[in-house]
Image (cartoon, rainbow, N blue to C red):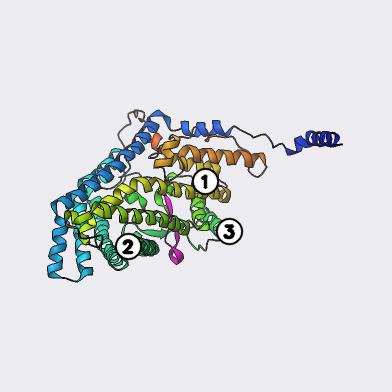
Amino acid sequence: MRLSGLAAFAAAIAIAGPAFATAPLPFDPEQATRAWLDTMGAEATARSDAYFEGGYIIGFAGTILSVLVAGLLLVLGWARGVRSWLERTVKWFPLVAFGTSFFYILVSTLITFPFSYYVGFVREHRYDLSTQTLPQWLGEQGIGFAMALIVGSLFLTVLYVIVRIAKNTWWVWGSVVTIAFAAFISMLFPVFIAPMFNTYTPMERGELRDSILAMAQANGVPATDVMVYDRSRQTSSISANVSGFGPTTRISLADTLLERGSPEAVRAVMGHEIGHYVLRHNISGLLLNAMIILFSFASVHFLFRALAKNERWGIRDIADPAGLPLIMGLLAVIGLVTSPMQRNLTRFNELQADMFGLNAAREPDGFAEAAILLSEYRKMEPSPIEEIIFYTHPSGWNRVHNAMVWKAHEIAAGRHPASAGGPPPSWIPDFVRNRQAPAEPAPTPAPEAPPANAEPSPAAP
């Protein structure tokens, strides 16, 4: 009986098998992905690879530089000298901590300025990614530096007061205060900080704006307008973002995205950003970063005790502001471990937002287009190890491939209009087209003199 039952079950499966089979895909997602990536060409691909891979070296160089600056201030005794002078003059501990923190941020920023200048200005212009003149860049750097100097010094003062009161458990309470501070700054960012660098204006009324608002409202986003900011003041690269926290949360898109992307690409990107809001990534991001901060502060606590034993470098204990360079040096080294962890957590959220955006906007070709435009400065096909260590977003190849897989299966299921895989015929990214040598223009006859009081041509300079 058992054998006959198994035979009957096998026969039933064989008969029902075709019912379980999925419909054939209308195109091969692998080939479609390759077709999108091939639109870049070898030169643009090599250029974006070189830019992104150079960031690996810059990251390590930045860590080494931070450690060297911290070591210099320790060995020369500058931080200890400032702390001692403040203790003799102002005496009150919070002012001593504030003054020492102010001194450290000021001096370390000035010492590392040449490095910041090369990375933020020279290198960006070398790869045609910056639109700023040197005075414009220096002006924004000055604003950021002033904010870091004041806000950073105040935060470190609060942290030192916690260290002094809590002693051996400071790293727990310090982590709580740090996360609360990060949430507070995030809440203030769209209202007070972002307008210092960019102008935000409502998006021009039209079909594209209405479709974005409809998508947002359909997914529970209480949006009544779409904000556009002038990213073109800093760079030509496309972007959009979710900024703020709680009541100040705002979804914004860059003017460069509107100028360079098709309406389908804009909707795809905004679907991604709406996904961040709906999936509450601002909250999950804070919670995940809280674990990293807790680990970092705990590591600093125990390593500091071992390195500063017997008042080495004149540091009394971890509550002594003279030990700030040592703390900063330790955090820089610990960052070599925590930074890949943080990037992986961020990439996980970005992948979630990608899939949400594909389902919300239903613009797979627009999503692939946006991924290609982002490849102007992101390596498209990293090795698995590269992606794990260095990427905060899914690689360009993964993003395009996910879009093509989604499109193929949705077409097969009858939920998406049928179309071929890969980019539209003759489509290439604008950054590739703009770098191609133009054909030599044919000679033109001299223009006739315009009549008096004639309006200038729209194309006139």
Task: Give the side of residue 304 with respect to residue 431, left or right.
Answer: left
Tell whether position 243 is magenta.
yes
Task: Give the side of residue 70 with respect to residue 13, left or right.
Answer: left
Q: In which quarter of the image is residue 53?
A: top left
In primary-sequence order, the first of circles 3 and 2 is 2
| Position of 107 relative to 150 (above/below) | above
Q: Give the range drawn in magenta.
A: 237-250
SS at circle 1: helix
> Disc 1 designates what residue?
264
Q: What residue type is labelled 3?
A: Ala
In primary-sequence order, the first of circles 2 and 1 is 2
Q: Where is residue 151 in the image (x, y as percent from the top left)?
A: 28, 63
Q: Quadrant of the C terminus?
A: top left
Mark 2 and mark 1 in contact? Answer it, CB < 8 Å. no
> Disc 2 designates what residue?
168
| Position of 370 relative to 76 (above/below) | above
| Crowd class of label 3 (few under 14; some 14 to 19; many from 20; radius 10 Å) | few
C-alpha separation, residue under disc 3 versus residue under disc 1 = 18 Å
Q: Which amino acid does label 2 sit on?
A: Asn
Q: Position of residue 277 (x, y in %)?
A: 50, 57
Which labelled disc corresponds to residue 218? 3
Q: Which amino acid does label 1 sit on?
A: Glu
C-alpha separation, residue under disc 3 versus residue under disc 2 = 50 Å
* Residue 456 in view: no
C-alpha separation, residue under disc 2 versus residue under disc 1 = 55 Å
Mark 3 and mark 1 in contact? Answer it, CB < 8 Å. no
